Amino acid sequence: MAFDFKLLSDDAIVDEQEAELNKVLDVYEDRLAQSKFLGGDCFTLADLHHLPTLDYLMASPVKSIFDSHPRVDY
């Protein structure tokens, strides 16, 4: 994982990408307000497809962005 290596990052790009992630999580939040899972009321490949990315993000410094999206639960 890149954040474990203490690599230099461009703060402007990081902020921009966090804003994009927040927009995506807003869409997920809205969708999950209507159904139990992303693909409907049953767990599907749509939900499964997002697990590796969520796992990565939840172990990164960006984890706190999920606090404002309670329905997007890992």
Image (cartoon, rainbow, N blue to C red):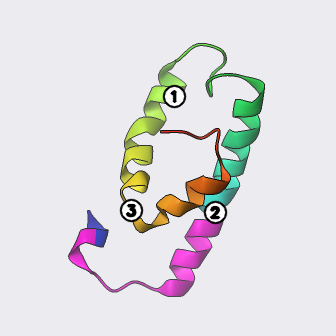
Camera-side residue: 59 or 49? Answer: 59
Residue depicted at x 42% and y 67%: 61
User: Which residue position is annotated with label 3?
Assistant: 60
Residue depicted at x 72% and y 44%: 27
Residue 20, label in figure: 2
In the image, residue 73 sits, relative to residue 25, either above or below, namely above
Question: Is there a contact, CB below 8 Å, between mark 2 and mark 3?
Answer: no
Q: Earlier in the sequence, mark 1 or mark 2?
A: 2
Assess whether residue 5 is covered by the magenta stretch: yes
Residue depicted at x 28% and y 81%: 7
Camera-side residue: 65 or 56? Answer: 65
**Picture coordinates of residue 70 (x, y %)?**
64, 44
Which mark lies nearer to you, 3 or 1? 3
Residue 62 vs residue 35: left or right? left
**Alpha carbon separation for disc pair 3 and 1:** 20 Å
User: Which residue position is annotated with label 1?
Assistant: 47
Badge count: 3
Dot 2 falls on a residue whose secondary structure is helix
Residue 32 vs residue 1: left or right? right
User: How many other residues sit within 10 Å of disc 3, few (<14), some (14-19) or many (≥20)?
Assistant: some
Residue depicted at x 76% and y 39%: 30
Q: Magenta residues, as a range?
A: 4-19
**Picture coordinates of residue 46 (x, y %)?**
53, 27
Q: Tell me which amino acid carries mark 3.
A: Ser
**Alpha carbon separation for disc pair 2 and 3:** 16 Å
